[in-house]
């Protein structure tokens, strides 16, 4: 399976940090956000990765290269200075993604979802990972029917995590250029061709400087606890 990391966003809510650094390269606990995602993908056995570039995108290419340092094979697509939005960016990358279902991950999230769960999963047009609604998005995005079929209507609604498995056919109806993803998903949901699951574990949308700082604190704490546990085990 191939994966695409969405990295072309301008990161307006992250300004002034993103005036000179693309959001995926912002660091949490000393490591770029996008590197955490690459490492999680490789750990799950997904090593063919496509990254879309727009705002300051060459910095991402220069930093990550061909992915060899992460045991990955990274390719890039270019969307100009302003980007193509989510569906347009995926459409632009289809020649690299191929004819089989592929994974798409937002470049500005942190999540402990195991990507290995999606390997060889059969889908119609898409399978989305949902999470419980964060404080900054209390109304959610989509409802689950029978814990499987997604719908834009119904309660309770959950938040789309930015992790999804997509079939290329979902994008067949749109022309190259800027295009949003939500209308495609909602139309396919009306035909019961989108499934989903609720991930109860850790997830954060790293959309603001305060959340970036919060993530750094969480990672540093987790690493400190792990070191203490290892020291205790070694001494015991």
Image (cartoon, grey):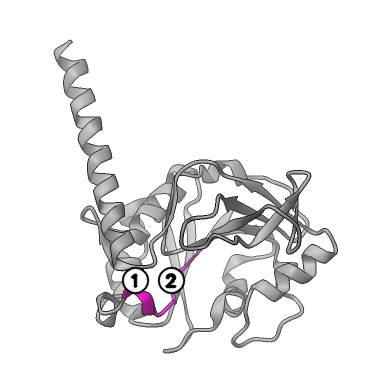
Mark 2 to mark 1 CA distance (whole Å): 8 Å
Q: Nearer the viewer, mark 2 or mark 1?
A: 1
Confirm whether residue 65 shows in the render. no
Q: What stretch is highlighted in magenta?
A: 4-14
Give above or below for 227 relative to 44. above
Q: Residue 156 or 164: which is nearer the viewer? A: 156
Q: Name the residue under label 2.
A: 7
Q: Mark 1 points at which residue?
A: 23
Question: Would residue 167 be counted in the magenta stretch?
Answer: no
Confirm whether residue 36 shows in the render. yes
Determine the residue positioned at 37% across, 80% down. Answer: 12
Give above or below for 178 relative to 63. below
Badge 2 vs badge 1, beta-carbon distance below 8 Å: yes
Q: Quadrant of residue 171?
A: bottom right
Tell me the tag on residue 195.
none
Q: What element carries label 1?
A: helix
Determine the residue positioned at 75% across, 57% down. Answer: 154
Q: In which quarter of the image is residue 64?
A: bottom left
Q: How crowded is mark 2: few (under 14 residues within 10 Å), some or many (20 or more)?
A: many
Give above or below for 68 relative to 86. above
């Amino acid at each position: 399976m191939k994966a695409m990391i969405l990295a072309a966003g301008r990161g307006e809510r992250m300004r002034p940090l993103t005036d000179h650094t693309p959001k995926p390269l912002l660091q949490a606990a000393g490591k770029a956000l996008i590197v955490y995602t690459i490492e999680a993908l490789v750990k799950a056995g997904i090593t063919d990765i496509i990254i879309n570039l727009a705002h300051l995108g060459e910095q991402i290419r220069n930093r990550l290269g061909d992915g060899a340092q992460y045991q990955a094979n990274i390719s890039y697509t270019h969307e100009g200075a302003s980007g193509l939005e989510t569906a347009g960016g995926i459409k632009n990358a289809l020649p690299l993604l191929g004819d089989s279902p592929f994974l798409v991950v937002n470049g500005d999230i942190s999540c402990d979802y195991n990507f290995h769960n999606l390997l060889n999963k059969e889908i119609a047009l898409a399978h989305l990972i949902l999470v419980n609604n964060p404080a900054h998005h209390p109304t959610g995005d989509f409802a689950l029917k029978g814990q499987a079929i997604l719908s834009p209507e119904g309660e309770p609604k959950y938040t789309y995590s930015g992790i999804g498995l997509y079939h290329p056919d979902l994008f067949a109806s749109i022309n190259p250029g800027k295009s949003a993803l939500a209308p495609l998903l909602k139309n396919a949901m009306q035909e019961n061709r989108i499934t989903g699951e609720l991930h109860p574990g850790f997830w954060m949308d790293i959309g603001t400087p305060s959340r970036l700082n919060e993530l750094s604190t969480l990672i540093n704490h987790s690493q400190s606890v792990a070191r203490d546990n290892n020291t205790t085990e070694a001494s015991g």
